[in-house]
Amino acid sequence: MAADDFSHFVDACESVRSITSKNAKVAIIAEYLSSLDDASLQIAVLFLSGNVFPRGSSLVLNVGFSAIMRSLSEIARLEPEEIQQIYLKHGDMGALAQHTVSKKEVSPLVEQKLTLAGLYEQLKKIAGASGSGAGETKKKILTGLLLSCSPLEAKYLVKIAEGEMRTGAVEGLVELAISKAFGRDPEQVRQAVLVSGDIARVALLAKRDALSEAKMQPLTPLSFMLADVMFSPEEIAEYYQKPLVCEYKYDGIRAQMHKLGAAARIFSRKLEDISESFPELVDAASRIPDDFVLDGEILAFKDGMPLPFQELQKRLRRKAVTEQMISEIPVIYVPYDILYIAGRQVIDLPLGERKKILSGINFQKPITDLGYRMVSSAQEIAAAFAQSREIGHEGLVVKEPESQYHPGKRGRHWAKLKRELDTIDAVIVAAEYGHGKRAGLLSDYTFAVKDGDDLKVIGKAYSGLTDDEIDEMTEKLRSIAIKDEGYRLLVKPEIVLEVAFDSIQKSERHDSGYALRFPRIKRIRTDKPADDIDTLEKVETIYKRQILLR
């Protein structure tokens, strides 16, 4: 078996999946990576990290549930409904593909080994398919690939296509494996990935002992710096005891804005390219002379006031944004940090200096620098919070003026203040059918927070969404079902909700040990990946905080 055979990759994945030891996983991946040539190394690292193409790539595979099901039904010569029933039995698309290919009644005309490079070229063809026949083209290529696979290879091909490489080889472990494979310092590898956003290139640089060449590059998104949560102006003032940069916490979409030459693009918290949803922002960015990378917020904004987040979501759901929609739901981009300017990375500069650079850029509307203020006392923070809420924003973010920008890290260099009991970002793990006018619709959602590598349920909510949103959720939840229990579906943990509540109480009903009292869905966080949901630790902190406030 050649090192670049797809079967070699699959064997490594199966070995990693079958063990629990982190060190053993790293050792297996490292041994595998060290055996690959340059091209195969970069492909394997992407696949192991749960990606198909590098961050910032214009290529998007866009192979959905239905396309995979149609390919599998063709291979097994079964009706789509029969394949659906088999899927619900297995509860996993990869397992379904493995089962189906093991029963295939159609044989490929030519038997040949599938290589990583060959597979990657075919995936690029799928991503590049466009026009009226794109769906059929994608299915034809995918079916051909599956017919070339062994059952086990089919399992991992579908996992790669779905972005569901849950083998235990998450990006952090892959970074450690890269460092072990080529004898590099793990922290240097991690920093190179955080700064460049390109783990495939970092793997190649590690192999060549050239990690110092990993640089930020506009049009390649990188992980966002994240803020911790504090619960009162007094807590903030007591903790920092110094002047702080104070900004409004906007009720919008956090986004990076990149510009390189004549090209400009916008990336979401999920590092997805959302430029098509906001053509007026892209146009404004492209007219600024310097190249840059900005961190900021997209807001629906009209007549000098922010519009509800639900209005902004309407822009995200549209494949083509019309002039009418731009007029009805105008947006602004509020930059509050700068990471790169005119060929120079500036994340290591103090925030105060980055703010000066930002203020020197001649932004064109609808890119709007709303500025900031300095606060030192609980009274000043409380006054700024009240003003933010009066305008229609969520609250405040305070930042240490000397803080550097740390991609992908959460800490108290930045802190957010929303309201005394905040909200919880949680992921849906089950959905039940409603009653009355909601009969036949999945409208009751059980949600969970993170507890280490596990998910722990903290409640169920059924209020807060519009009829249209419930229709869309029903379709989406059915497409990610892993088990059908008749009255409810267990689903893949993919859909993030922001849940408001009156209080938190102890509860034996949920495995978290807590329950949200009177939970209501504030919004669907389409901009937020499931990896970024809140933790059980935050739930416990809010619970203890409310006791002190009584």
Image (cartoon, grey):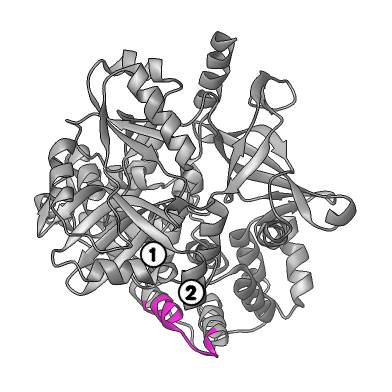
Identify the residue position indicated by label 1 in the image.
273
Asked if the magenta segment contains residue 122, the reply would be: yes
What is the C-alpha distance between the residues marked 1 and 2?
A: 15 Å
Asked if the magenta segment contains residue 143, the reply would be: no
Q: Quadrant of the C terminus?
A: top right
Front position among marks 1 and 2: 2
Q: Is residue 112 visible?
A: yes
The residue at the point 48 percent across, 55 percent down is 165
Q: Secondary structure at mark 2?
A: loop
130, above or below 251, in the image: below
Local crowd at mark 2 within 10 Å, few (<14), some, or many (≥20)?
Answer: some
Question: Could you say where residue 230 lies in the image, as x and y percent from the top left?
Answer: 42, 24
Identify the residue position indicated by label 2 in the image.
321
**Magenta residues, as a range?**
121-134
Q: Please name the predominant secondary structure of the magenta segment in the image.
A: helix
Three-letter code for the amino acid on which mark 1 is drawn: Asp
Three-letter code for the amino acid on which mark 2 is drawn: Val
Local crowd at mark 1 within 10 Å, few (<14), some, or many (≥20)?
Answer: many
Q: Is residue 215 visible?
A: no
Sequence-first tag of 1 and 2: 1
The residue at the point 55 percent across, 85 percent down is 140
Question: Could you say where residue 206 lies in the image, as x and y percent from the top left?
Answer: 17, 52
Q: Nearer the viewer, residue 258 or 530?
A: 258
The residue at the point 24 percent across, 70 percent down is 286
112, above or below 271, in the image: below
